[in-house]
Each structure stands twice: as C-alpha cells, then as structure tokens.
Amino acid sequence: MKRSTKRSVDQQKSGRILGMPEQAVKIATVVVLIGIWEMLSQAGILNPLHFPRPSKLIATFWELVTVGYPTGITVWVHIKATVVRILQGYALAAVVAIPMGLAIGRSHLLLRATNPIITFARSIAVISLLPLAIVWFGVGELSRILLIAWGCFWAILTNTVQGARQVDVNYINAARMLSTSKTQLFFRVILPATLPRIFAGMKIGLGVGFMVIIAVEMVGTIKGLGALIQQARFYYSSHIAIDGMIFIGIFGLLISFTLDRLERIILPWAVGLEEVER
Amino acid sequence: MNHSGFTKGLWASWLGFIILLVIWQCIATFKLINPAVFPGPLSIVHTAIFDVPGGRLLQHIGISLFRVALGFLFGLGAGVVLGVTCGWYLKLGSILRTPIELIRPIPPLAWIPIAIIWLGLGEPSKVLIIFLGAFFPVFTNTYKGMVTIDPLVVRAAQTLGLGGTKLLLRVVVPATLPDIATGMRIGWSYCFGCMVAAELIAANSGLGYLIMNARQVGEISIIIYGVIIIGVINLITDFIIQEVLIKRKLKWQYITT
C-alpha cells in the first residue's frame, strides 16, 4: 500500500515503528488485540455469551466448514447460495442498465427526461423495497434477485450515463473525419471510451449488491451468508454470528480484489492512459 | 447551453416524470395488473390523505430521523477524531488503523444480528448499526484527506511560524474538510439504508416499521407511500447537507479548485 508520507510536518519517514518494520507492527497489533480478548474472556470480564473467546471462534470456524450451521448446511452451501443470487441479480442489472445508460448518455432529450426519475430512484433505500418485493414476488428467490438487481442497476446506470456523456468530443470528431459509419463510431469509439466508467459502475454496483444481499437474506431463508448470521441471532449463538461476519468480510475483500485485477486485464487503457499517449 | 435549450430541457425533465405517472395510472385504471396488488398513483395519494394520519406519520418520521441523526453524529465524531489522529500521528495511526481496516470490509448491515445479541432489540442496537454506517466512510475519507494534503500548504504555514496543534487545527484540518464532507455525504446515505434495514428487522416504530407493518396487513399503497416518503426524506436531507452545509461553509474550497 502506498501512502504519501512525504510530509514535512512529521519527520517519520523511516516507515519503522519502535524499530520494527510497519508490517510487523501491524501483525503484532492484531496478535496483541486477540490475546487481550482471549485473556479478558478467560478471566470472565467479557461475557462469553456476547464475546466468545477467539479460540472458540477458531473451533467454530472449523465446525462451520465441516458440519455446518444449521447442521448439514456448511459454509460452502451458504457462500454458494449468496454467490448465485448476486450473480443473477447483477447480470440482470448489467444487461438492462448498460444499453439504457448508453442511450441516455448519448441523447440530450433522454438525459433531461430521465434525470429526475433517476435522481429520485437512487435516493430510495434499496432495503425499503424489501416489503414491497415480498408482497409482489413472494418470499422466494425472485424477490431477492430482483432487489439485488435494483441495487446494482442504478449504480451501473448512472456511471454508464456519465461515461457516455463525457466521451471526448475530439475522439468523435476525429472518427467522423475518418468517415466512420454510425455503428462503427458507436462500437469502435463511444463504447470503448465509456467502458472504464461502465466498469467503475459495475464495481460500485457489486458493492451495493453485496450489501443488499446480506440484509435481504435475513428474511425468509436459511441458506446464504446473511441467513447464517440471522439464524445465529435467533439461537443467541454469538460465536457463529461473528464467524459468519468474518466470512462475509473475507468474501467482500475477495470480490473487490478480483474486480481490481479484472479491470487491469480487460481495460488496460483505462489505467495507463498517459503512457499510451506519446 | 443556450437559453432555449435550457427551458426545453426543463420541460423535458418534467415530461419524463409525468409520462411515468400516466403509464402507472393507466396500468391501475385499466386493471392490467390487479390494482389491489399494484395500486396506481391516485390511490396512493388517497392513502396518503385518508389512511395514514399525518400525526402518526410525523411520529414515525421523527423517530427514524432521531435514530439516524444520533448514529450519524456519533459516527461522524468518531470518524473525524480517529481519522485526524491517524493522519497526524502516522506511527500511532498505522497501529490504530489495523483493527479498523480489518473490520471495514464487513458491511454495516451484517452487524445487525450481533448488535441485537449484544445490545438487545432496543434503540442502542439500531444506533450502533447506523453509527457503523457513518463511521467507516467518514474515517477513510478523513484519513485519506489528511495524508494527501498539499505539502506546500503545510510548508507555507510552517514558514510563517505555525507548528504543533495550531498547525493541525488552523491549517491541516481545514484543508481536509472537503474530504470529510465527502465522507459525510456517503456516510449519511449509508446511515439511511442502515436505519431502514434495522427498523425492518426489529422495531415497533419508525418508517421501516411502518412499511413492514403495512406488509403484514397487506396494505400495499401504504408500503409504496412509505417507500416514497423514505426516498423524499433522503433526497431532502442530502440536499441540505450538500447545498447548505457543504457549499456554504466550504465556499472557499470550491472557488480555488
């Protein structure tokens, strides 16, 4: 991780704390914190019902992977259920939002006409649609997928619109000067120039979808990471809830890490624009 | 853009909304979808006027806003204080940031079950979740603002003899304010989502409860009305934060950049 520590205010340029490299200090911090937590629970200062010991959390971790919670539903089943839902909703949102965003972004009239609707729809909290989705589409999978799609949709749409609007006029003029047809102009100039923003929108959208799914899974299902922690709450099993949260955190990190990598592979021109322009 | 283009645009922006409403009303009027399941805008207006007493609605809005404001203020305070501390004392910061960065990937809504186990079903658990919604964006943006501050600004202040706490409070923190403001806006919208989710899952008052309760009794127009109210309040409060607080207080930042 790069940080701009070149500040004259603090002469702390060495990157070493108490004579140790920064990474070591960070690891030590985690170890010490977990150690304190373990000791406080052992001593009975922290209520073990609320703050289970880290050693118990590790044992539970293993139990979740092998036996599962509720029994028989291992953490892999939960993760799979969540992934399948996110992917379905996400794909649905992307398929609708990207063409729509391109159309809106390239047309002044459409942009004007949809702007208030988009602004308002974006300010609606996705979760507040949960009761409505349940009434309309039942408590099944369809409701969950549609809610995820709704959450992702607006992020992808607004970013696509922004991207399509901000295509450099010089590119378009240059392409026109070379007498490109309208279809060619769209597929060879506008679309590639918009892709970085579309990707940014897809990244934000996935983040939103990830947040939505956790809440949505808390209602009416026992499969999924959100369901796992909600079930744990019903049975007052804080160790399972905390382990579930750790799984959710790791899962979220994995998603954003993969997307960053993917962006560099698929869209090299979005990152090193300056290097290409000589 | 020329003047006529602007007025045309304004006209178009309302037209889009009106077309949407008309289509919606037509679906209900011609019973394309059962109006009991998919009520039109007119019956929602009817519900708004006759079925939901204004006093009760204001009560729900009041309690929801109170929860959001409380959690948000705690989150804002903690985020700014910790962000400034981590950005000013970098070595202490890299220790303090370690646990924060470890917890950050967990979305605030995933805290709902453990918050209920820890604090019960009452107000504290909701405020905790809303707090988390505000804390992380405010903290990360404040910290980012602190470490990416223009070194020239700091050096200029030092040349003029400022140092220590005075440098921090008179120069560095004001220079970080735009980033704090960004964190505030993101945090506020997160808080709103957290409030609704927390109220849906466990509450007996507030806007989230209003729509969840309407679902149980099958009053779909009340649900839609509640969703719209939540959206409008979010829109208004975001506008207040952006236009009134940020633009007015940070005018100088927007002029220079």
Image (cartoon, rainbow, N blue to C red):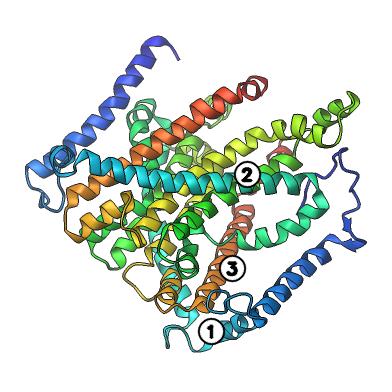
Residue under numbered circle 3:
A250
Image check: B164 left or right of A106? right
Residue A257, by quadrant, is: bottom right
Q: Answer with mark 1 or mark 3, whichever residue precedes in sequence.
A: 1
Residue projecting furthest to the top: B3
Instruction: Give, as a three-letter code, the residue at label 1.
Output: Val
Q: Nearer the viewer, mark 2 or mark 1?
A: 1
* Residue A65: mark: 1
Image check: B156 left or right of A47? right
Q: Is residue A24 above or below residue A55?
A: above
Instruction: Give, as a three-letter code, the residue at label 3.
Output: Ile
Residue under numbered circle 2:
A270
Q: Nearer the viewer, mark 2 or mark 3?
A: 3
- Name the element at disc 3: helix
**Front residue of this view, candidates B179 and B214:** B214
Instruction: Give, as a three-letter code, the residue at label 2.
Output: Ala
Q: Answer with mark 2 or mark 3, whichever residue precedes in sequence.
A: 3
Image check: A71 left or right of B250? left
| Percent x, y of residue B49 | 16, 37
